[in-house]
Image: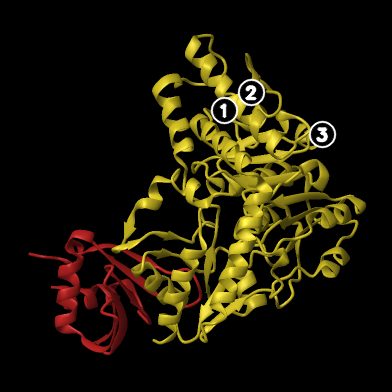
Chain colours: A yellow, B red
Amino acid sequence: MDVQALRKDFPILKRQVNNNPLIYFDNAATTQKPRQVINAISNFYENSNANVHRAVHTLSLEATDLYENSRQKISEFIKAKDWSEVVFVRGTTEAINLVAYSWGLNNLGKGDEVLVSLMEHHSNIVPWEITAKQKGFTIKYAKVNADGKLDYDDFENQFSIKTKIACLSQVSNVTGITNDVKRITKAAHDNGSLMLVDGAQSVPHMAVDVQDLGMDFLAFSGHKMLGPTGIGVLYGKKEVLQKMQPFQGGGEMIKEVEYKQGKGCSLSWNELPWKFEAGTPNISGAIGLAEAVRYLQAIGMDNVLNHEKELTKYAVEGMQQCSKVIIHGSSDLSNNCGIISFSVKGLSSHDVALICDNYGIMIRSGYHCAQPLHQEVLKLQSSDRASFYIYNTKEEIDRFVEVLKEIGQL
Amino acid sequence: MATIDDYVSRIEGTCGAEKDVIVVFKYEKKDEAIANILKKAQIKNKIAGIIFELTFQDTSFRLYSSGKAIFRSIKNRQELNNLLASLLL
């Protein structure tokens, strides 16, 4: 993997921030975009822009081909059995909300349980908390060990006949720890439960095979994997999606709206996946995401993961030389996926992030939308997070460590 | 007559339990804002010419040469606005 060569594909990496070369270590929040993705979006608007489906003119047919070919490309990327199992949404958050509202509101009630872990992003907690208040079901939280690793025994022991769906992130957005979702999916299915996997931090970084892992739902975002913002995917097993009600109503998701005088309209839904895609979709977003997938496939997902693991190990070794830096999470890096959370003694996380910003280094500070993990498990007010991707280099990490050493002298 | 809006681009509450407030100065006015603040506040510490630990009216805060300031223990927006007005105007 020639990092220096691929960096040339990312125009933004040439810029300076606060009179320093940009070092972008906030990839868990969003990634930068290669020229190929930017061009794919521009090309669509410059040459093929039209609304998709339900028109017979040339531009609409071209736009529809581009949009649906993007779905096909993405379904192959995650090894879905069928392209109709890929629903385009705004991102991971909307994907999980779709399941919570469309499936949850119609299948959960008093006495039922939803099982999540304490390491979840708020996106995998809040939709369930909101719908639980409406339907009266219970949410159970599986424990996470002090080192940030999932307590598998606790998760598995909490399954019961009441559990209707289990929800787990494949990679923690705070610690970078990778969960064995295949194991938890098997436990869910053994207990008659569905399984939802939050793939926001896994799909961009490793090969994910939905058929091998077996989950019923997988949610992920395009913008965390070189694609544009506002596009993401809900993968769902066909047999599960078919039984679900639409999430939103409007154009495209409907087959017929038959008006009967005095009785209003009778409705019938469109086929999968369009049943879940009400209104004009994010066409250029889907095309951009498919281009991002092509870019990642050309590199190879194993190469992506190996590069990030190497950077993570290198960064941790460097950060451990900084006397005031405390790294959170497990010291076992074999399961870490390019994310390091840390604190600097005596400084708030925001101070550290602002100081890094002064040197052109972009890191994140705060809860990273995982307040329960911070408060209940890591016992932190907040943390700093450095997260890496394909275009990051050891030289950038060297600079980052230098800055951390300077910060340690404050 | 100048107001703090002439200098301030955004005020953001931070994520996390600390409840810090970050003031982002307008790019084109940041140097002037920093100069005004440094004239009025007392410098407790200066690090590499880019970070200033300051106190003003019993409030401690940090000012960054990139044009941001981080305030702690601010009770409400009015208190912050009053402080910024005293520092900037």
Residue depicted at 86% across the width and 63% down the height: A156
Residue B68's spot in the image, x, y percent? 30, 69
Q: What numbered label is drawn on residue A250?
A: 1
The reply to whether discs 1 and 2 touch (Cβ–Cβ < 8 Å) is: yes
Question: Given the image, what chain letter belongs to the residue carrying mark 3?
Answer: A
Query: How many angstroms separate mark 1 from mark 2 (CA)?
Result: 7 Å
Q: Earlier in the sequence, mark 3 or mark 2?
A: 3
Three-letter amino acid code at the position of disc 3: Glu
Residue carrying label 2: A254
Q: Assign a secondary structure to mark 2.
A: strand
- The first of marks 3 and 1 along the sequence is 3
Q: Which residue is mark 3?
A: A239
Q: Residues within 10 Å of mark 3 (few under 14, many from 20)?
A: few
User: Which of the chains bears the disc numbered 1?
Assistant: A
Q: Looking at the image, can residue A44 be seen?
A: yes
Residue at the spot 88% in from the left edge and 50% down from the top edge? A189
Q: Is residue A193 above or below residue A70?
A: below
Q: Is residue A116 above or below residue A197?
A: below
Q: Amino acid at mark 1?
A: Gly
